[in-house]
Image: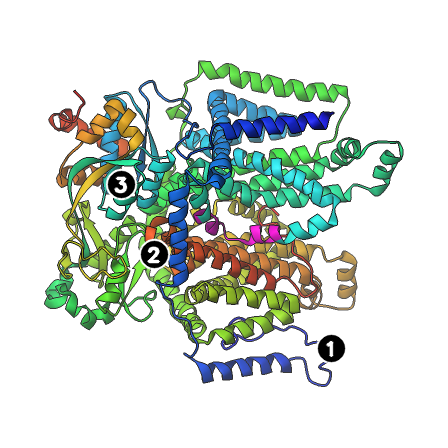
Amino acid sequence: MKKSRLIAGVLVLGLGAAACGGAKVEDDSAAAPGASPAGTVKMAINGWVGYEASAAVVSYLLEHELGYKVEKVTLAEEPSWQGMESGAVDVVIENWGHEDLKKKYIEEKNVAVEAGSTGNKGVIGWYVPEWMVQKYPDITDYKNLNKYADLFKTSESDGKGQLLDGDPSFVTNDEALVKNLKLDYKVVYAGSEAALIKAAKQASEQKKPLLMYFYEPQWLFNQVKLVKVNLPVWEEGCDSDPKKVACGYPPYDLDKIVSKKFADTGGKAYELVKNFQWTNDDQNAVADDITNNGMPAEDAAKKWVEANTAKWQAWMPK
Amino acid sequence: MVSAPVQAAPPVPAPARVRRLPRWVAPVAGVVVGVALYVAFRGKSVLPHDDDATLFHWLNDARDWVDANRNSNPIFLYVVNYLRLGAAEVFALIQGALVALGWPGLVGLAAGLGWLAGGWRIALVSLVGFAGLGVLGFWEASVETLALTLSAVVLSLLFGIPLGIWAGRSPRVRRIVTPVLDVMQIMPTFSYLSPMVLLFLIGPASSTIATMIYAMPPAIRITALAIERVSGVTVEASESLGATRWQTLRKVRLPLALNTIMLGVNQTIAAALSMVPLTALIAAPGLGEDLIRALARVNVGAALVPGIAIVLIAIVLDRMTRAAAQRRDGGTRAQAVRWGGFAVLTAAGLALTPVLAQEFPEQWQVQIVRPINDVADWIEAHWYTFTGFLNDTVAYGFLNPLQDVLTSAPWWLVTAAVLVFAWRVSGLAAGLVAAACLLGVAALGLWEHGMQTLTMVLVGAVMTIAAGLALGVAAARSRWFSAVLRPLLDAAQTMPSFSYLLPAVALFGNGRFTAITAAFIYAVPVVARVVEDGLRAVPGTVMEAARSAGSTDRQLLWKVQLPMARGSLLLAANQGIVMTLAMVVIGALVGAGALGYDVVAGFAQQEDYGKGLAAGVALVLLGVMLDRITQGANGRRSPHKKRNA
């Protein structure tokens, strides 16, 4: 008797589940508890301080001017896009290209939308400390790198020259570049932006040879002199196959990506994100405060906001 | 003998049938043959790494298929997505409850539960421990970590205890379940993450499920053991009184097994707590996020403090469940005191919730990040020559040569060497499994990276086992030393594995040696503990006998204690190696490369997804291989109590 009732119960449950036609991934009912009245914005935090600076300023305004609660989700770049599908992320405040992801998540899946430029100009390339250029003037041409490969040998580079990359999740074609440009180098991952910065400082101060992947906007250029190595010039489409790339990086117009849901229902928060636009110098100022003046991101954002009222007031939703 | 050509064979007794030859002949001959073959075939049939392997592309396509059909395929619509929603719901529910209690309420509840489990001592530990989370300035993140841990533990127990009861009752089920559990526990935690993301996307749901898979084995194992141990006489008595099987289970077996099952809960919590921080890589909230951020900034202090918070949570939960496992029922009076105390403490906490501020008061928080960083900076600045020297010595002296040998040796030679070595140490079956695993790595197209990982594991494991042995022996010989060492080991064991990366990075920069150093700190405590326990277990009478026969201390150690503790030593080696593997892989976050890097890149770069997934499987195979090799000559299964064992 008991048993048959149990079976009936299970059946009813099963039918109930079937009746609602299965669960789709966007049916994420598990909203965060304790949300503030205006709502919660889930902001992805990618792993470089420039990103954090932008995120801090936008978050500060969302919280203090518009009354939202901002949840920061520490994530790598590509998982952040996935997060817009799963509901874990609403906003990516600084996106570097990622044409393939735009195709997948914006065009095909329709779970994300572009929210305009951040105003920041992004540059990615290979850099050496300035003293090396004075000593070996032709080193800035990639064709001469093999000549100097011995200088860059380390314990981790398998007897080749070392090309120091950052976090494995950053935008990079370096392994393919080394292979396709036939360079006698090995890509070694430092693991993070901070590790790259440390290496750059040491290389300048102690006159140690260093060839590294780096990028702008970046506060370090105000402190340490680095010179860019010239890779074959980028042309439209030369990097479409990630395994066959043999050209340098394109100039990036950094932009914002938000989840479709946020664009539709984000209200004023979405307006603010869409309007947010500043310069590389603005970002470097905040990033510098965070990294070198020991300020928590929130305080650094507050400082910038208080000093630049006119700029951010233009971003406020009407 | 993975690296036949460069290492001397360990002193394993030769099989009895080689009667006339001295026991060293066979191993030496083996090494000579190995070296000769290596010299002859060096550089031939090597398997250089190819990023473009067909398998990787195929896996990428599989990923794309899943991505495209996530919302239309019935398996996803009716099974996978519901699992995801269910896990998310459990997490949201528990997190909601913990947050709603408010910090005074939660601290009060913890103290109350502590009181209930083990009286005022445990209540005090819980009170101080949980308040400490706030004092460190990590209250909110700690609550999230706690919520994730509890969600995973609840689910683990929900599935693990029934499975354990089943396995405890039926030897056949047990035979099927045991190898699966073995693999689940040997699996480096890192390799779980990619498949989880594929099925359940990123977020707390994925994290809960991944943690559950990692934490369930101890629940199943210990429950099975507990049920099995319930004396047959009692069960028979109950059955002869006419109890049904269900009644016997509920009224006899479970109550009798309860205390042991509580220990299973304890182990499950420990396992969950060690996994949860790592799942921050797939967007789980909590202390793990702080750790990742600290890692990205190379900020030692900022990594250590959340690490300490996790240790506090671990200590509180451990003491609570341990006390609950030892609990003996007293009279009604004692019962009343226990429940009364629980009610008073919890009510006091809850009553304070509306009175005190919602967030943990800032003036009660202590800042210790800066002093820790000052120390770290000082060490970095002043020990630079020494640390650089150490790094280069290990890299050029051991890592590079060994890696050269392993990657330039023919794949069949390495496999044969593994087969022969595992056969000698652990028997033919183990040898065959080990060799098969290695062939699996080759089939996945990850041979070269596999050999690089193996190099790090071997060098790391040798260092770890040597140090663990020395510490263990010292602790077994001096009570005083042991008393000092124990709490340090306890703390070191509960720290999340990846907070060790940072001090290592600060000292040695980025690279393989850093990963090895972190693995060393991570695994030495366990090795030392197992060795110490093994040595202490040598019966006093044997020691007395040896002493009275005129043995010196030295002879006593080498001729009596160590040989008699052989089982423990093998277990120590086994644990040391498996843990080193787990950590070396995480070292990819700080530039150690190899398979670990493939895994990291796999969930960070679209086009590397297939490679990452394959690397995860390769890691599991390597783990099983290393485990089988060190499983022990007597066919004994190691208990695999990884943490808090």
Q: Which residues are magenta?
A: B180-194
The amino acid type, in three-letter code, at marker 3 is Glu
Disc 1 packing (10 Å; few <14; some 14–19; many ≥20): few
Here the colouring is rainbow
SS type, badge 3? helix
**What is the CA distance from the residue labelled 3 to the residue labelled 1?**
71 Å
Point out the tag, 2 or 1, that comes first from the N-terminus: 1
Q: Name the residue carrying label 3.
A: A107
Q: Name the residue carrying label 2.
A: B509
Nearer the camera: disc 2 or disc 3? 3
Residues tagged 3 and 1 counted as in contact (Cβ below 8 A): no
The amino acid type, in three-letter code, at marker 1 is Ala
Quadrant (top left, top right, bottom left, bottom right) of the N terminus of chain B:
bottom right
Disc 3 packing (10 Å; few <14; some 14–19; many ≥20): few
State yes or no: residue A89 in magenta.
no
Residue drawn where x is 69% and y is 85% of the image:
B21
**What is the CA distance from the residue labelled 2 to the residue labelled 1?**
50 Å
SS type, badge 1? loop
Tag 1, which chain? B
Dominant secondary-structure state across the stretch colored magenta: helix
Disc 2 packing (10 Å; few <14; some 14–19; many ≥20): many
Q: Which label number is shown at residue B16?
A: 1
Residue drawn where x is 23% and y is 47% of the image:
A99
Q: Nearer the viewer, residue A32 or B293?
A: A32
Instruction: Give percent across and percent down for residue B392.
Output: 36, 66
The number of numbered badges drawn on the structure is 3
Instruction: Give percent across and percent down for residue B613.
Output: 43, 54
| Lateral position of residue B393 relative to residue B556, left or right | left
State yes or no: residue B191 in magenta.
yes
Position of A67 relative to B310 (above/below): above
Q: Nearer the viewer, residue A188 or B512?
A: A188
